[in-house]
Amino acid sequence: MRFETTFDRCGRWGARGTGLLLLTAALFAAAEASAQSFTPGGDSDPRVGLGAGWLDAEEASWNMDLVANLPKPDGFYNEDDPADSRFVNSDLAFQDDLVFVGNYNGFNIYDVSDATNPSLRVSVVCPGGQGDLSVYGDLLFMSAQETRGRIDCGTDGTPDLPVDPERFRGVRIFDISDLDNPVQVATVQTCRGSHTHTLVTDPNDAETLYVYNSGTSVSRPAEELEGCTDVRDPNDPTTAYWSIDVIEVPLDRPEDARIIDSPRVFADEESGRIDGLFEGGDHGEGTQSTRDTNQCHDITAYPEIGLAAGACSGNGILFDITNPAVPVRVDEVIDPNFAYWHSATFNNDGTTVIFTDEWGGGSAARCLETDEPEWGANAIFTLVDGRMRLASYYKLPAPQTETENCVAHNGSLIPVPGRDIKVQAWYQGGVSVFDFTDPENPFEIAFFDRGPMSDDELMLAGHWSTYWHNGYIYGSEIARGLDVLAVTPSEDLTQNEIDAAKLVRFDEFNPQHQPKIVWPADLVVARAYLDQLVRHDGIDASRAEAVEEDLDWAEGQDDGPEKRAALAELATQLWDDARSAEADGDQENADRLRSVAGAILDVASSMN
Amino acid sequence: MRTSTYSRLAAALLLVAVVASCRSIPEEAPPAPRTVQPGAPGTQGQVVAPQPGSVIARDRHTEADVRFMQNMIAHHAQALEMSSLAPERAHRDDIRRMAHRIEVSQAAEISLMKRWLERRGEEVPDLDAPHGAHAHHGHAELMAGMLTPEQLEELASATGPEFDRLFLQFMMYHHEGALQMVEELFSIPGAGQETEIFRFASHVDSDQRIEIGRMSRMLNADG
């Protein structure tokens, strides 16, 4: 059944349903035939000029491979209109070997225990958009914002206006302890619905979970939901605009989840005006027109460092979340190139934060050759003493066509030790992996891209989100389903660095609830640092070779005093090398040498 | 340009794969996954069985949605007409900039609305038709915030600070009309619930509110 469906959908759009062997042979031939020189974004960038199609668009990739694609399941696409926005695939959440893919019509849960051969586990129908998901233990959280959303997950919409008791806009909570039969346990109604939400844990209270809700659409009237008012006036103290919602979830009684506060996080401290931040409009000649700050679009919490980055329409905001029930604004920035502050990602050290600008709302072609490279891009800020300072912009280097919706969108870190690397979705611009270790000089190191859905018209599609999880990159493609991608070694990323990244495992991963990455004690981590040292000319070739030989030897030994002593000795030598490098004024390579030494010591001290 | 850029870049040899799609054809069919529809809290859900190619969703749009899009195209078209007057007549740079911005964003939205209608097999208003033809449709003249031919003429014949003031006043009035159209859409039972129109109408609402705020400040700055 599945075979036929997949086959038909591919065949109908022109691809040939040849046997697997023939197809594989063809792939090899294509890859070899097209080996060529280019610079990302340069004139011969292979992302330019890709052939169009729904499930048979031409593809280009560099330093990464698409290892699997599962088109959207039955009931979640419209074969007469593959861009039908009722069935948009949206954001992702991860638990163990499960990938939860949000959809405007519900969500789908995939089993990725074999990532190269994912399978659909269960489809859940529950319309309301955008279907932003987070998972926490047995609970799955889902955003709903549209007026068609119903408490009972029904598909008929809500006929009665302005008040319909069956309407649901807010955060749904499902019990997924029986994965094949998710049950709604709570529906937290909010005034402006839920566009995105963010889980926030309290390091001092394991019994309570917090959810920051970002509603971005029109508020409903008090007649429909008590406490709401559809008046959009900052002088009206009851307005649902100019706030976020803080939801408290008692984990032993999730059915009691409720909004505990809708703090005025944009208020001006001195005047007390609730619309204290950006008022909307441009910033002068040649600048972008920026939305006003009456909402956050998305918030990324990083509880380990006690901070959250709020991408809040007209501003980028830093919140202190050491008390998650009371987020406190500690810094905010504006940017004359930003149209709409959309999402955020911290680096692992919490010294850099990336904000994205969703210029055009995601449904417009904003990666044209003629577009300003700072518009619809990422802005990368350094974080010093809780203050943000702009370091640079990064935009998908390859221009896209007028029929491809494209702008900066969601991504996550790839956990390579010693470096800051992010994989990011750019809608029909595809997937871009870039290094921002030096926040002032980000550069691309891998990509994957498909041709447009159509050469004739812009059909909404492309990657909504791409996140690294336990060794692979998972992509939620709006119209084309679930993608699984693997990064491959290159000059800019060695096999050791990839292997070290693969050591990092999370039982649960919600990208907007950013976890601290800690690498386990393993010599491949040392090898990754050593590769970085070599890349930056921080070590003689012969010395590097000798260190590698020592590591090879150690890997061939059983754990024991002899191995431990040898590793400790090697680490000590490298530590001395670091001191020399420092004396020579090469601080960066001194740090790298210490990282190699530290990773080796970790292994030595982890032995019994 | 192509050659010079190319030769300037001493790029390393990079392996690039440009391949066709449809690679995940399963060798054998796995067991069919379940599709479930949960119920309200406290109730059990049900198993549903979608057929290949079927959709589990209500109809896409209503007649009111179609009317809204058709009318908004004509409404936006008048904003373009007003904005096109600014480069020659405006006194202040920020007015010219605002007019340009409105022109760019509303032209893009007109394309979006046309696409929306075309994809649903609905009639797309012909903007190239002479003004008289608009009147025959009966919508354009009735829509909130639309300027009368006399007001348009008044704007077109103004220049300098007088144009600036009129432009701001008329455009704010025009934008208020768009907000009213959105409000009306959402007040019609069943309307504005389709994803795309919900998003579009919400964007019109927020974008034009910001522009009204900005124009209001510009008007005040003028004294």
Image: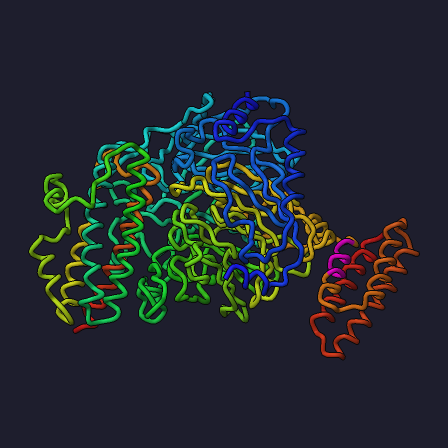
Image point 65% across, 36% down: which residue?
A: A116
What residue is shown at x 90% (from left), y 60% (from top)? A565
Where are the magenta residues, as a range?
A524-531
Could you say which is closer to the camera, residue B20 or residue A137? B20
Q: Position of residue A204 (x, y in %)?
A: 57, 54
Q: How many marks?
A: 0
User: Foreground residue, A107 or A241?
Assistant: A107
| Image position, residue A205 (x, y; %) | 56, 51
State the scheme by which the image is colored.
rainbow
Q: Which residue is nearer to you in this view: A275 or B185?
A: B185
Residue at the farthest front position: B3
Give coordinates of residue B211: x percent, y percent.
Answer: 26, 59
Residue B21 higher or lower than A260, as above or below: above
Residue A431 inside the magenta-drawn segment: no
Q: Nearer the viewer, residue A267 or A389?
A: A389
Q: Residue at x 37, y 29 (%)?
A: B57
Residue A232: percent from left, percent from top: 26, 54
* Dominant SS type (magenta): helix
- Whether residue A80 is visible here, answered yes or no, is yes
Tell me the quadrant of the picture where the N terminus of chain A can be found: top right
Q: Residue A255: in sight, yes or no?
A: no
| In the image, residue A530 lies in the stretch drawn in magenta | yes
- The residue that appears at 50% across and 58% down in the rendered structure is A395
Residue reaching furthest to the left: B150
